[in-house]
Amino acid sequence: MTVYIILGFIVWIALWYLVFYFRYQHKDVVNELRSNLKDANKEIHDLNHDLEEYLQQNTILKDKVSELLDKNDDLSGVVSELSKYYVHIKKAAEKTSELTKFLQNPNPDIEEKIKGFVDNHKEQDDSEKKFF
């Protein structure tokens, strides 16, 4: 009976050795896969953190873009008003250039009309002085 116990013990040890041998036969591959898994988990964690940060930045940028679009609409209204004024100023500049051309060449008819106007104005001033 003791022989069976010793034989059973030896078979038991042989089985554990075979399990140990087959389990740790590819120990280097298992360790490499574990390190790759740790690296992949760390990279996933970093990417999730970056994703959260980018999402927050995206919401901030969307808010800023909407504000800038509103300001752009306001500024386009101002620019349209300024362009209207620019057109009027340009027309006035053209008219003043025409006026300076006319004023550079004296016209005797205009001088007579101005004298008549000045004489009428003097008579009105004299008549006003008589009443006071």
Image: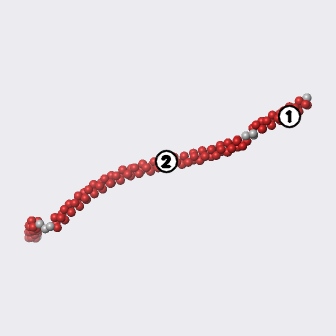
Residue named by callout 2: 58
From the viewer's perspective, tell me whether residue 114 is left or right of residue 23. left
Circle 1: residue type = Ile
Q: Secondary structure beneath disc 2?
A: helix
Q: Is residue 131 in view from this perspective?
A: no
Give the CA distance from mark 2 to mark 1: 68 Å
* Residue 108 horizontal side relative to residue 27, left or right: left
Q: In the image, is residue 92 above or below residue 45?
A: below
The answer to whether residue 14 is above or below residue 102 is above
Choose top left, top right, bottom left or bottom right for residue 6: top right
Position of 28 with respect to 54 (left or right) is right
Q: Secondary structure at mark 1?
A: helix
Three-letter code for the amino acid on which mark 2 is drawn: Asn
* The label number, if any, that marks residue 22 in the structure image: none
Residue at x 11%, y 66% (from the top left corner): 107
Q: Residue at x 82, y 35 (%)?
A: 14
Q: Of the residues under marks 2 and 1, which one precedes in the sequence? A: 1
State the residue at coordinates (87%, 32%): 7
- Residue annotated with mark 1: 10
Q: Is residue 103 depicted above or below 10 in this figure?
A: below
Q: Nearer the viewer, residue 90 or 18?
A: 18
At 20% from the left and 60% from the top, the residue drawn is: 95
Q: Position of residue 60 (x, y in %)?
A: 48, 49
Q: As drawn, which residue projects farthest toward the top?
A: 1
Camera-side residue of 23 and 46:
23
Nearer-the-camera pick, 132 or 50? 50
